[in-house]
Amino acid sequence: MTVVPLIEDASGFRGEADAVYAPESESDLLELLRVAVTQRTPVTVMGARTGVAGGCVPERGWAISLEKFRRVEIRSGAAVTGAGVILRDLQSAASQTGQFYPPDPTETSSSIGGNIATNASGSRSFLYGDTRRSVRRLRVVLLDGRVLDLGRGEPVPFEVPSLERPRTTKFSCGFDLRPGMDYLDLFIGSEGAIGIITEAVVTLLPIPASILSGVVFFGRSAALDAVDLWRNVPGLRMLEYMDGPSLDLLRSRGFDIPEDAAEALLIETVDPDVDAWVDRLDAVGALSEESWFGTTAADRERFRIFRHALPEAVNETVRRRGFQKMGTDFAVPLANNREMMRIYSELLGREFPGDYVIFGHIGDAHVHVNLLPRDQAAVERGRLLIREFARIAVSLGGVVAAEHGLGKRKRDLLALQWNPEQMAAMRAIKNRFDPRWLLGAGTLFAHPGAP
């Protein structure tokens, strides 16, 4: 076992640990947990620390990095992957066999274990679904020393309370409790609070023979019309949004964006009928001649870099101003997408003019609002605004966390999502697996007895 430095996630959230370990094997991990339980030492599991909710950041006790769990075995239609495997490495290995990992979260330096722990999704989840849909098998280490090897179809061996899940396409706000659920689904999205995922078998799909990708620019507020018209286009696997301030921020980073572009949609389709797409662009008044399109892997990578440059620019701007990331991860049912977007525009224009961007997975009614505060007063105002957005999202049938999890930074939002009885049901699950509340201490729930 070795000790490694840390401790901060991509949001700028920081914590402290008494020690940091990077076990080299499952037996090493089990020994660490045995000692931790004996000493009643809290344990926080870390992946690549690319999260933005603070789930991987310890408040105290030990931090355990799974960075050495890097085994990858590519099969036909599936991959066996250690929890510490980096997403881009899995995609690279899969591509050499003509396959790809469908969820494809935006942050390519994230770990597979972290993706599973938050039930992460990405731009292509519009067609392929979230991480949960692609997980076939999990290996999970429990605090009591048991090692579970769980496949699809294996039921939970105890009665599970039912929580009525919101009708959104994504969900990452606590335990996904459903009668008849598969046992492994209890650990997907659990944020390392009840067990430690060490290995997974995930689905791989054949790389499509042809893919048309593009960045469609709009000179007026027509992007939402396009979203409504294009959402059900066969073969569309990506439908991403950028507002005007997002494009301005990217312009400041050197991207040559058309001057009259006020919004953009990023698309990918496995049915690349160019003529049909030209007609679709014309029908919604897009800037057809100034939009970008391509059919090669190099084109897709160029557009991916363009898309990923936006959250990187946001994080850099906030850090430079001396603050932590202030972003939302709310999603609403598809039918309420326009109403949520209207509310964002109205309240942001009034409360945070000129200091915000909106971008993300609009095909799933799941965009990220990111605030760019300039002083502490704006931070305090922003916290109140984000909480108001969360309340509104829930009132529209939405979720307070769609893909990032809640971790420690956003755990207070859990009580907006669930009533006291439902919260008690989740705590009962936590107590069953971790009666001393040592694992993922402070993630999802405050320590017992804390205010």
Image: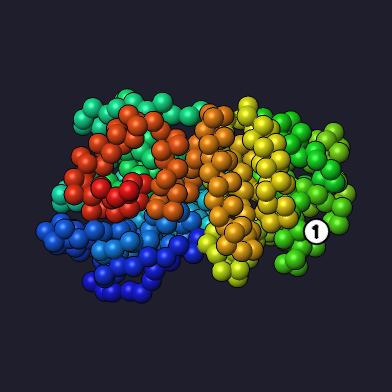
Quarter that holds the N terminus: bottom left
Which quarter of the picture shows residue 3? Answer: bottom left
Q: Can residue 39 be seen in this view?
A: yes
Residue occupying the point 42% across, 40% down: 414
Relative to 79, does residue 375 appear above or below in the rendering? below
Residue occupying the point 24% across, 58% down: 42
- Disc 1 on helix, strand or loop? loop
Residue 113 place in picture, x, y as percent: 38, 53
Residue 427 place in picture, x, y as percent: 28, 39
Looking at the picture, the colour scheme in use is rainbow
Relative to 282, does residue 311 appear above or below in the rendering? below
Q: Which amino acid does label 1 sit on?
A: Ile
Nearer to us in this view, 51 or 388: 388
Nearer to us in this view, 413 or 237: 413
Residue occupying the point 13% across, 61% down: 39
Which quarter of the picture shows residue 131? Answer: top left
Residue 189 place in picture, x, y as percent: 39, 43
The residue identified by callout 1 is: 257
Nearer to us in this view, 431 or 362: 431
